[in-house]
């Protein structure tokens, strides 16, 4: 199933394959998110908003942390993802996760309400960062925290060098730009926080690395094997370039000595004064 017509601006689309990719992504990167949430000292009873929740993989983590007395709201444009999350919550007997279908820019959010707003892998896609963030700042209570996990798209590297994939990071940055996004988005967040009176309380970059059988290289494989052909379809690269990239990528996957370094994912959190 695909919802690409309902939310056509979203670069990665919404479908079963993408849901499975997000689940695998959680198995590789979930420990980094958990460390971030632990540093933020999320408490039982907190009210949390998971923005661009997708199928709610972070919402589920948050519900584990806030317990029965807390509240988790998943804000997400895709009904397909929210239906999946509703099913997960029902299976666990949880009645304090609710799903709101909509975007950050347009949803009606209560003022000064949430202890924590969490936004993972969303802001790099949005065409107007300030328009996206402004309602999220308003919905935080004074002292509340907005926490963002997203790319600063440096660091991506496939070793040994010398093949078509040496140019991959630049191509992915162009792919994000083609949808109105910015793969360096976390570099802009501290300045935006400061201008809106938020104090930066965390700024932690992470690069994961591993060989051909590692989770992180498999995570990258699931993204590149799906999206390199789409980049060619969108005219960001030629079909010939796409073939060269996929051939070089597959050749690296066959070699034991290969190392893949992920792009930097930055945890950045701000506290509302
Ligand atoms: C890469 S997925 C990440 C999902 C989830 N946060 C996670 O980490 O697993 C990005 C999600 O952001 C949602 N999204 C895109 N633009 C949005 C917006 N303006 N407001 C809210 N959600 C948005 C998409 O529908 C998609 O589900």
Image: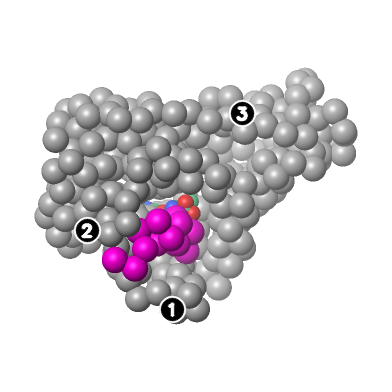
Q: Earlier in the sequence, mark 2 or mark 1?
A: 1
Q: How is the image coloured?
A: one colour
- The residue that appears at 50% across and 34% down in the rendered structure is 265
What secondary structure characterizes most of the magenta part?
helix
Mark carried by residue 106: 2
Which element carries disc 1, helix, strand or loop? loop
Q: Quadrant of residue 248?
A: top right
> Magenta span has 41?
no
Q: Tell me where residue 62 sits by quadrant.
A: bottom left
Region of the chain picked out in magenta, as a range: 55-69
Label at residue 1: none
Characterize the local packing of mark 2: few (<14), some (14-19) or many (20 or more) Cα atoms within 10 angstroms. few
Q: Is residue 133 visible?
A: yes
Up the image or down, 272 lies above or below 152; here it is below
- Checking the image for residue 93, the label placed there is 1
Q: Ligand 1 near label 1 (Cβ, under 8 Å)?
A: no
Q: Which residue is mark 3?
A: 156
Left or right, 16 with respect to 99, comes to right
Residue drawn at (34%, 48%) of the image = 42
* Real-space Cα separation, disc 2 to disc 3, in angstroms: 34 Å
Gap between marks 1 and 3 measured at Cα: 41 Å
């Amino acid at each position: 199933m695909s919802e690409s017509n309902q939310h056509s601006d979203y670069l990665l689309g919404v479908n079963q394959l993408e849901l499975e990719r997000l689940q695998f992504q959680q198995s590789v990167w979930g420990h980094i998110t958990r460390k971030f949430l632990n540093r933020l000292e999320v408490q039982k009873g907190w009210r949390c908003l998971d923005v661009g929740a997708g199928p709610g993989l972070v919402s589920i983590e948050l519900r584990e942390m806030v317990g029965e007395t807390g509240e988790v709201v998943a804000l997400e444009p895709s009904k397909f993802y929210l239906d999946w999350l509703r099913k997960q919550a029902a299976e666990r007997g949880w009645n304090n996760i609710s799903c709101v279908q909509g975007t950050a820019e347009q949803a009606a959010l209560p003022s000064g309400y949430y202890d924590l707003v969490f936004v993972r892998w969303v802001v790099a896609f949005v065409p107007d960062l300030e328009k996206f963030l402004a309602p999220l700042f308003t919905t935080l209570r004074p002292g509340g925290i907005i926490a963002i996990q997203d790319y600063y798209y440096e660091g991506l590297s496939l070793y040994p060098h010398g093949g078509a994939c040496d140019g991959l990071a630049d191509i992915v940055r162009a792919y994000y730009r083609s949808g109105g996004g910015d793969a360096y988005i976390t570099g802009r967040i501290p300045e935006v926080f400061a201008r809106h009176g938020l104090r930066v309380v965390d700024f932690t970059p992470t690069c994961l690395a591993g060989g051909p059988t590692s989770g992180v290289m498999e995570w990258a494989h699931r993204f590149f094997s799906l999206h390199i052909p789409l980049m060619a379809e969108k005219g960001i690269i030629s079909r010939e370039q796409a073939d060269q990239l996929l051939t070089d990528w597959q050749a690296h996957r066959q070699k034991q000595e290969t190392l893949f370094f992920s792009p930097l994912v930055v945890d950045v959190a701000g506290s509302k004064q």
